[in-house]
Image: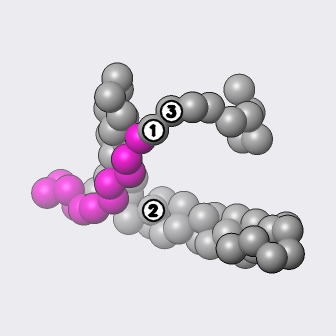
Amino acid sequence: MGINDERDIEANLQIGPTDQGMVRLFVVSETFEVPMDFEPDEAEEIAEEILAAAKTAQKMKPKGKR
């Protein structure tokens, strides 16, 4: 499975701080839960990667679609 492979899976993403000073990304679906904890500096790097990917995706978006 690659980043461009589509799957018919619904999941929710929750993001927030933990009581241990970590940032948690928590993915939940009907069949699984994936908690991922990151140091705050790692979370900032992830946020930068998400923003960069969003900017690239905006440039790739077909005209007329939002």
**Amino acid type assigned to the residue bearing label 2 in the image:** Ala
Residue bearing mark 3 = 9
Q: Residue at x 24, y 62 (%)?
A: 17
Residue 45: which numbered mark, if any? none
Q: Secondary structure at mark 2?
A: helix
Residue 10: which numbered mark, if any? 1
Q: Residue at x 45, y 62 (%)?
A: 43
* Residue 26 position within the rendered picture, expressed as x and y whole percent measured from the top left: 33, 46
Separation of disc 1 and disc 2 at Cα? 24 Å
Residue 43: which numbered mark, if any? 2
Where is residue 35, by image quadrant? Answer: top left
Separation of disc 3 and disc 2 at Cα? 25 Å
The quarter in which the N terminus is drawn is: top right
Separation of disc 3 and disc 1 at Cα? 4 Å
User: Is 59 displayed left or right of 31 in the figure?
Assistant: right
* Residue 36 position within the rendered picture, expressed as x and y whole percent measured from the top left: 38, 43
- Magenta stretch in the rendered image: 11-21
User: Is 19 displayed left or right of 45 in the figure?
Assistant: left
**Badge 1: few (under 14), some or many (20 or more) residues near its Cα, within 10 Å?**
few
Question: Which residue is more in the foreground, 6 or 52?
Answer: 6
Mark toward the viewer: 1 or 2: 1
The mark nearer the N terminus, 3 or 2, is 3
Q: Is residue 14 above or below residue 58?
A: above
State yes or no: residue 64 in magenta. no
**Amino acid type assigned to the residue bearing label 1 in the image:** Glu
Q: Is residue 38 above or below residue 63?
A: above
Q: Secondary structure at mark 1?
A: loop
**Badge 2: few (under 14), some or many (20 or more) residues near its Cα, within 10 Å?**
some
Q: Is residue 1 visible?
A: yes
Where is residue 34, by image quadrant? Answer: top left
**Amino acid type assigned to the residue bearing label 3 in the image:** Ile
